[in-house]
């Protein structure tokens, strides 16, 4: 399976910071696969996103150790527009990502493809596709500044998808979505990974979501990778609780029933199907 | 502090009078100027000391509803009453002493250069000074776990801690009504537990807490009452055991919501009202399957995270 993005021994220190925010992180994003990232508050998850997408140090400065390569090329040698086409980034606070310059959601999502100089027919096709993937065709004519928090997050995600990059770095893409919206986006991400070969890294506190869509998971702690492995293995790892990460509901319930020493296991297994 | 003793409000509504709801929406409708109708005749009564979660689809009107409480928005028709008094003639500055609102997006709220200054801003505007002000700032920062960051610039904090800072800023105002717009967004398990404790303490002290949330587990574990909104209307209203119970599932699904997993498992096993891990395990223990004799001395199993 081909490597789309690779961090090797990556460390990062924000400009003026006394301590590094990221230490010696090595990981790979593979074509068509979803990598989940979990960890407690301030463990370096958002910094990892900025570094992987080349914004740190490329745009915001600071000091990078080790290497970050997209399709084999170091991000430090790439121009911003090259990076934008290869690697899309959704910020944790997605509302800050909207341009506040457009009058409709359709126009907002078309900004990226327009800026890359694509022909109008291609722009329209991409915008329609992106709105459809996240289920917001009905918002196309709405004013982007008059949307709810969750709707803004979906518009920001559609804007990133419309660039059709080879890598997607998503910092809590479902944080403001209702449960139905969360499920729709999660399944859409898994589907586009499979169908288009895009490599996805997704930071997500909702481990129930990762249980459904992630192939592999890394757990961050104090700027470093604390645990890494196949999703099912990591999500059942008892160390998660100590790291401030909730196990998926299913794992929690199975443990609780086991701890109760009652003979409910068979019934529970049936009820969880 | 008890409900109704807010010092800045001698002449204003002091929420908490006997027998009068803390909050009452009377057939409130709201439309944006361009015509988008967001609230459709919402009627709700919330008593002092209640903890209420508002849940619903993205864009269903949850944030719009709560912004009517502190005067950021005014109803197109209908009335909003605090402690029995119509809020229409009351200025936003007056309402700020009664209703504290922690925004969904902390970056729309934070502006000071130091964490401590950020938290002091609200109570200072209510006329609090000196050691009382310092005490409130310290207590609020302590409560959200930011006591060691009082000299930090808010924008040097990560998103999850900026959310907690926004919460501390509202806590320090000690308003009789506290509104939290998606307080657990971006929080890890410890952060969510912290917010849950704050809700319990504030409501336990007789103040009213309302939170908007998409986190059904947090909702089921932290609130006594759940209000479900869909397309600008209230479609379900009751305790978590009822709102997440099987009879409500079609309405929940129509609102793009899902019951928490323990509620689903409990229903499939023929148990009733098990919206949380703890209530499910307690119900399992109570029916004791498999003929195993129960040991009354054995404590009910507790749930880790």
Image (cartoon, coloured by chain):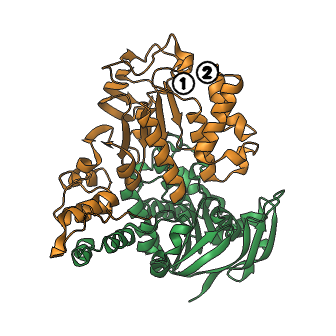
Question: Residue B118, image x and y in percent?
Answer: 68, 36
At 62% from the left edge and 37% from the top edge, which residue is drawn? B139
Question: Badge 1: how crowded within 10 Å, few (<14), some, or many (20+)?
Answer: many
Marks 2 and 1 sit apart, C-alpha to C-alpha, by 8 Å
The answer to which quarter of the image holds residue A76 is bottom right
Q: Colour of chain A?
A: green
Q: Tell me, yes or no, whether the two marked residues, 2 and 1, touch with CB atoms within 8 Å.
A: yes
Question: Residue B76, image x and y in percent?
Answer: 38, 23
Q: Which residue, given by chain and number where applicable, does mark 2 sit on?
A: B126
Q: Which chain is orange?
A: B
Q: Which residue, given by chain and number where applicable, does mark 1 sit on?
A: B96
Between circles 2 and 1, the one closer to the viewer is 2
At 37% from the left edge and 28% from the top edge, which residue is drawn? B48
Could you tell whether B18 is left or right of A23 in the image?
A: left
> Do callouts 2 and 1 point to residues on the same chain?
yes
Callout 2: residue from which chain?
B
At 46% from the left edge and 13% from the top edge, which residue is drawn? B89
The residue most toward the bottom is: A1
Residue A13 visible in the snapshot: yes
**Residue A81 or B139: which is nearer the viewer?**
B139
Can you say whether A100 is above or below B253 in the image? above
Can you say whether A92 is above or below B114 in the image? below
Could you tell whether B175 is left or right of B149 in the image?
A: left
Q: Secondary structure at mark 2?
A: loop
The residue most toward the front is: B297
Which quadrant: the C terminus of chain A? bottom left
Callout 1: residue from which chain?
B
């Amino acid at each position: 399976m081909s490597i789309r993005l690779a961090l090797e021994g990556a460390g990062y220190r924000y400009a003026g910071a006394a301590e590094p925010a990221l230490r010696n992180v090595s990981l790979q994003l593979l074509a068509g696969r979803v990598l989940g990232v979990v960890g407690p508050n301030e463990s370096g998850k958002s910094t990892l996103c900025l570094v992987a997408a080349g914004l740190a140090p490329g745009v915001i400065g600071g000091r990078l150790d080790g290497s970050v390569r997209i399709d084999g090329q170091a991000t430090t040698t790439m121009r911003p527009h090259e990076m934008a086409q290869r690697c899309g980034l959704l910020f944790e606070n997605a509302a800050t990502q909207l341009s506040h310059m457009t009058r409709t959601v359709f126009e907002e999502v078309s900004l990226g493809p327009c800026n890359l100089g694509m022909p109008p027919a291609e722009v329209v096709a991409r915008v329609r596709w992106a709105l459809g993937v996240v289920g917001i065709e009905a918002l196309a004519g709405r004013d982007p500044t008059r949307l709810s928090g969750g709707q803004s997050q979906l518009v920001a995600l559609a804007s990133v998808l419309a660039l059709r990059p080879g890598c997607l770095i998503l910092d809590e893409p479902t944080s403001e979505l209702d449960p139905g919206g969360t499920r729709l986006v999660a399944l859409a991400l898994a589907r586009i990974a499979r169908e288009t070969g895009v490599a996805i890294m997704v930071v997500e506190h909702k481990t129930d979501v990762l249980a459904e869509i992630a192939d592999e998971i890394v757990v961050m702690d104090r700027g470093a990778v604390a645990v890494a492995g196949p999703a099912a293995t990591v999500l059942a790892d008892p160390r998660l609780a100590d790291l401030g990460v909730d196990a998926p509901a299913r794992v929690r319930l199975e443990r609780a029933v086991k701890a109760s020493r009652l003979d409910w296991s068979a019934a529970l297994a049936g009820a969880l199907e | 502090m008890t409900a109704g003793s807010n010092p800045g409000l001698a002449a204003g509504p002091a929420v908490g009078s006997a027998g009068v709801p803390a909050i009452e929406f009377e057939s409130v409708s709201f439309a944006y100027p361009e015509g988008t109708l967001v609230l459709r005749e919402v009627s709700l009564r919330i008593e002092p000391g209640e903890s209420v979660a508002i849940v619903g689809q993205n864009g269903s009107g949850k944030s719009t509803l709560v912004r009517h409480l502190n005067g950021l928005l005014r109803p197109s028709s209908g009335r909003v009453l605090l402690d029995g008094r119509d809020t229409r003639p009351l200025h936003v500055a007056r309402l700020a002493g009664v209703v504290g609102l922690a925004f969904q997006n902390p970056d729309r709220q934070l502006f000071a250069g130091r964490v401590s200054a950020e938290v002091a801003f609200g109570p200072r505007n209510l006329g609090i000074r000196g050691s009382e002000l310092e005490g409130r700032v310290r207590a609020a920062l302590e409560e959200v776990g930011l006591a060691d960051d009082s000299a930090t610039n808010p924008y040097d904090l990560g998103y999850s801690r900026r959310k907690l800072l926004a919460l501390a800023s509202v806590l320090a105002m000690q308003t009789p009504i506290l509104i939290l717009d998606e307080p657990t967004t971006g929080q890890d398990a410890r952060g969510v537990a912290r917010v849950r404790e704050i809700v319990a303490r504030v409501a336990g002290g007789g103040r009213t807490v309302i939170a908007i949330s998409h986190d059904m587990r947090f909702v089921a574990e932290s609130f006594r009452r759940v209000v479900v909104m869909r397309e600008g209307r209230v479609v379900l209203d009751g305790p978590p055991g009822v709102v997440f119970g099987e009879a409500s599932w079609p309405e929940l699904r129509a609102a793009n919501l899902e019951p928490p997993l323990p509620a689903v498992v409990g229903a499939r096993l023929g148990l009733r009202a098990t919206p949380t891990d703890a209530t499910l395990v307690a119900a399992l223990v109570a029916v004791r399957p498999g003929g195993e004799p129960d040991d009354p001395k054995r404590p009910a199993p507790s749930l880790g995270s």
